[in-house]
């Protein structure tokens, strides 16, 4: 059974940083492209970025240059480093091993002063 457990969210001031983690199990992590998605207030599920081998990492335009996706295949863990956060980044963040239809419970990121 695929399990994805996101963590690391919290309340941060504008301009701040957070690191999210996603612990994966139930599938061969290193063989999968992994993605982050987010659901912001009043909006649908938004793709944030994807990391895969050998294609590298791609990002949505709204986060490019501010967010960084990385992975530790030995630990079956995906990371999302969020920098220069704005209030528009507030939302529930999810990791997924597909198009977002399989994801964990999410971790809440709130950017507020």
Image (cartoon, helix red, strand yellow):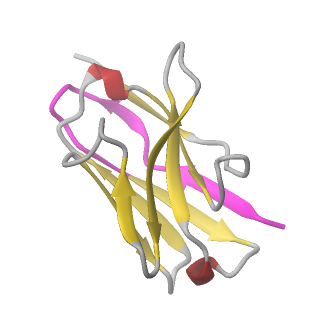
Residue drawn where x is 36% and y is 44% of the image: 60
Is 68 or 98 nearer to us in this picture? 98
Q: Above or below — where is 94 with respect to 38?
A: below
Image: magenta residue range: 1-19
Q: Residue 14: within the magenta?
A: yes
Quadrant assignment, res 88? top left
Q: Is 78 placed above or below 72 here?
A: above
Can I make out residue 57 in this image?
yes
Residue 18 drawn in magenta = yes
Q: Is residue 110 left or right of residue 98?
A: left
Question: Residue 24: horizontal and vertical position, in percent?
Answer: 63, 68
Residue at the image position 46 percent from the left and 80 percent from the top: 53
Residue furthest out toward the bottom: 74
Q: Quadrant of the C terminus?
A: top left
97 lies left or right of 7? right
Looking at the image, residue 70 sits to the left or right of residue 21; the answer is left
Query: What residue do we see at 67% from left, 50% from top?
Result: 103
- The quadrant in which the N terminus is found is bottom right
Residue furthest out toward the top = 42
The residue shown at (35%, 29%) is 89
> Measured from the top left, where is residue 27 in percent x and y?
73, 76
- Does the image show residue 111? no
Towards the viewer: 1 or 61: 61
Residue 39 placement: quadrant: top right
With respect to residue 63, does 92 lie above or below?
above
Q: Which residue is at the far front?
A: 55
Q: How many marks?
A: 0
Residue 57, position in %: x, y? 37, 65
């Amino acid at each position: 059974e695929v399990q994805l457990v996101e963590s690391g969210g919290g309340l941060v001031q504008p301009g701040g940083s957070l690191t999210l983690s996603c612990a994966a199990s139930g599938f061969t992590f290193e063989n999968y492209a992994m993605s982050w998605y987010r659901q912001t207030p009043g909006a649908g599920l938004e793709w944030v970025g994807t990391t895969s081998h050998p294609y590298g990492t791609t990002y949505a335009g709204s986060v490019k240059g501010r967010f960084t996706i990385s992975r530790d295949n030995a630990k079956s863990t995906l990371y999302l480093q969020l920098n220069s956060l704005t209030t528009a980044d507030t939302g529930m963040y999810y990791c997924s091993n597909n198009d977002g239809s399989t994801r964990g419970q999410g971790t809440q990121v709130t950017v507020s002063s």
